[in-house]
Amino acid sequence: MTTAIALRDVVKSFNGFRAVDSITLDIPAGGIFGLLGPNGAGKSTTIRMIMDIIRPDSGTIRVLGASSHADVRSRVGYLPEERGLYKKMKVLDMLEFLGTLTGSSPRDARTESRSWLERLEIGDWASKKVEELSKGMQQKILDEPFSGMDPVNQNLFKDAMLEISREGTTIVFSTHQMETAERLCKELALIDKGKLVLSGPLAKVKEGFGKNSLLLEYEGDGAFLGRLSGVARVDEYGSYSEVRLEAGADPQAILRSVGERLRVRRFEIVAPTLHNIFMEKVGATAAPVLERVGDA
């Protein structure tokens, strides 16, 4: 199977508002797929339809080759952003219960849950009540990955995702953290205002935007960068900035202007980051137009 999830002309409206507008998308089997978009773009609605929590008004969705979610329910898991944890239950008991909901026997669910608790370095908390866990500990088991986690636990969770992905599991990763998505996702789709704006392998997506961004490290105040001729947008981080150029702008002219006012430590012409691509596409005032970039 080369496609894990296939959506064809999927539409979903709520009280006359079209939350998902004729989305057609193939999510390849295996690997980590980024489903990206701003708040209210339609990501959660799309995921809930994939999970058969709600049904589309029109269009079709196939998961793991099946048109009926009941046929694959035991093979699909969902980590929602909002917690749905039973605070008074013990951690291991709760995980065992959730495992049985997908068809595992209590014994198998308990064994698997204990294994993952150890893997995520919270095995000592198996007999504690869920309400005793910190926010970060709760996120390790049943919440949006990476959000609010410290770097050590982010790395631990990242390794776990990569491991199960290499074993053949398809992961659909919905996040606002573009840096994390850029590091993990082989392929992605960007949704805005219910429409599919672009999709494709990350490398092809970045190639499609050309190498017209500059990475600048410098000493001094770079607040003027956005006012330079030929500069479309600047993401400034103190002594470091990513500068997105207008079409046809001369990077060397930018370097000369910057060099007159700042001490430049690094100057590099690169493809734009996923963050800048995100900002450019969802910041457009015109209706989004689908771009399918490259082949999987």
Image (cartoon, grey):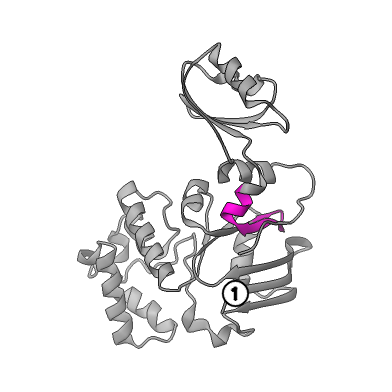
Could you tell me which residue is drawn at 60 percent across and 62 percent down? Answer: 44
Horizontal and vertical percent for residue 110? Answer: 29, 80
Give the x, y percent position of residue 275: 57, 43
- 75 and 260: which one is in front? 260
Q: Is residue 247 left or right of residue 169?
A: right
Location of residue 96 (image quadrant) = bottom left
Quarter-of-image position of residue 128: bottom left
Q: Position of residue 12 (x, y in %)?
A: 72, 68
Q: Is residue 35 visible?
A: yes
> Is residue 98 left or right of 58 when viewed as pictured?
left
Q: Is residue 90 left or right of residue 58?
A: left
Local packing at callout 1 (Cα closer than 10 Å; few below 14, some 14-19, many 20+) is some
Image quadrant occupied by the N terminus: bottom right
Is residue 90 at least partly visible in the picture?
no
Q: Which amino acid does the dot numbered 1 rest on?
A: Thr
Residue at image location 56% in from the left, 42% down from the top: 273
Is 125 rendered above or below residue 4?
above
In this view, the residue farthest toward the top is 260
From the viewer's side, name the closer residue of 46 and 262.
262
Residues in magenta?
190-206
Residue 8, position as x, y percentages in the image: 72, 72
Task: Classify the position of the C terminus by image quarter.
Answer: bottom right
Circle 1 residue: 3
Q: Can you say whether 186 is above or below 108 in the image?
A: above
Number of numbered labels in the structure image? 1
Q: Secondary structure at mark 1?
A: strand
Identify which residue is drawn at 26% across, 74% down.
114
Q: Is residue 290 above or below residue 234?
A: below
Residue 23 located within the stretch drawn in magenta: no
Judged from this view, the residue extending furthest toward the left is 124
- Check if residue 199 falls in the magenta segment: yes
